Image: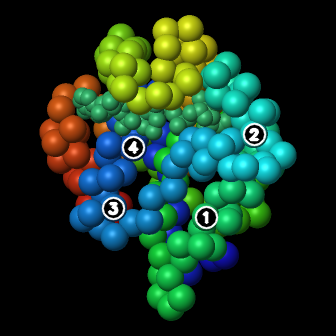
């Protein structure tokens, strides 16, 4: 694929920063197709007959990063399924890439990203959001033990990806502490500054 056929915007931020929430708004207003790497992994985990189910379950519970071959294949399949026949398709890829090897592999074998939306939020705020969501989400990683592990992986493994994109001038950084609507106003300003 080339940037003339598809525009890819990555959406990164710590666990509970509000990636999914902001993506839903961007889908409505900008016509993006939203692909959440975490959602795709959870679907694959639950797909009867999947050879990766148990492996994915273990990685998610431990808050570690599933080997990139699996995730990139799921993303590519979802992109093919969602691609408009004619014209350009806009993709929001949520929660990916969260490790440098994934970033390099995706950009060289699938398509380079246009930019990355990076949502910043203190851990204390994210923790309370996730514990609150955990009351009803059914997510196996919305418990305090898994949340702490997810935070550590984010700092140690995923922040280097954000730092690299930042050095390349490809990051739109938005503070994501206020309410969803207020955060979204800043997101829209950031997208406007990128010509979207
Ligand atoms: N909420 C959202 N915004 C709010 C706001 N502004 N004010 C107040 N509340 C707000 O939001 C989380 C909760 O907060 C919700 O209850 C929401 O209402 C509220 P959400 O929008 O869901 O935040 P999000 O950033 O999407 O949080 P999520 O839990 O999805 O983030 P993670 O990055 O932890 O989860 P993800 O699904 O991306 O990944 C899960 C796991 O999959 C990873 O830990 C990893 O093990 C695996 N994975 C890989 O291995 N590889 C990948 O490439 C991707 C994932
Ligand atoms: Mg999410």
Which residue is under mark 2? 53
The answer to whether mark 4 is within 8 Å of ligand 1 is yes
Residue 140, horizontal then vertical, whole percent? 56, 24
User: Disc 2 to disc 4, how far (Cα)?
Assistant: 23 Å
Residue at the location (24% across, 64% down)?
29
Q: Residues within 10 Å of mark 1 (few under 14, many from 20)?
A: some
User: Disc 1 to disc 4, how far (Cα)?
Assistant: 17 Å
Ligand 1 shows up in which quadrant of the image? top left
Mark number, residue 78: 1
Quick one: SS at disc 2?
helix
Q: Are marks 3 and 2 in contact (CB under 8 Å)?
A: no
Residue at the location (36% across, 51% down)?
23
Q: Quadrant of the C terminus?
A: bottom left
Would you say residue 100 is visible in this rendering? no
User: Disc 3 to disc 2, how far (Cα)?
Assistant: 29 Å
Which residue is under mark 4? 20
Q: Is residue 112 above or below residue 16?
A: below
> Does 190 sit left or right of 49 as displayed?
left
User: Disc 3 to disc 1, how far (Cα)?
Assistant: 16 Å
């Amino acid at each position: 694929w080339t940037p003339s056929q598809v525009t890819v915007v990555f959406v990164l931020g710590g666990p509970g920063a509000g990636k999914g929430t902001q993506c839903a708004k961007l889908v409505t207003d900008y016509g993006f197709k939203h692909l959440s790497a975490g959602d795709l992994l959870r679907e694959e985990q639950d797909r009867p007959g999947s050879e990766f189910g148990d492996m994915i379950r273990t990685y998610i519970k431990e808050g570690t990063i599933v080997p990139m071959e699996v995730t990139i294949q799921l993303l590519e399949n979802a992109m093919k399924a969602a691609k408009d026949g004619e014209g350009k398709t806009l993709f929001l890829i949520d929660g990916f890439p969260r490790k440098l090897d994934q970033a390099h592999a995706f950009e060289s074998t699938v398509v380079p990203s246009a930019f990355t939306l990076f949502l910043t939020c203190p851990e204390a705020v994210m923790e309370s959001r996730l514990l609150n969501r955990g009351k009803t989400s059914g997510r196996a990683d919305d418990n305090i033990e898994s949340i702490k592990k997810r935070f550590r992986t984010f700092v140690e493994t995923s922040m280097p990806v954000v730092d690299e994109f930042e050095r390349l001038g490809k990051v739109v950084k938005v503070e994501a502490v206020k309410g969803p609507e207020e955060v979204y106003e800043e997101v829209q300003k950031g997208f406007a500054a990128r010509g979207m």
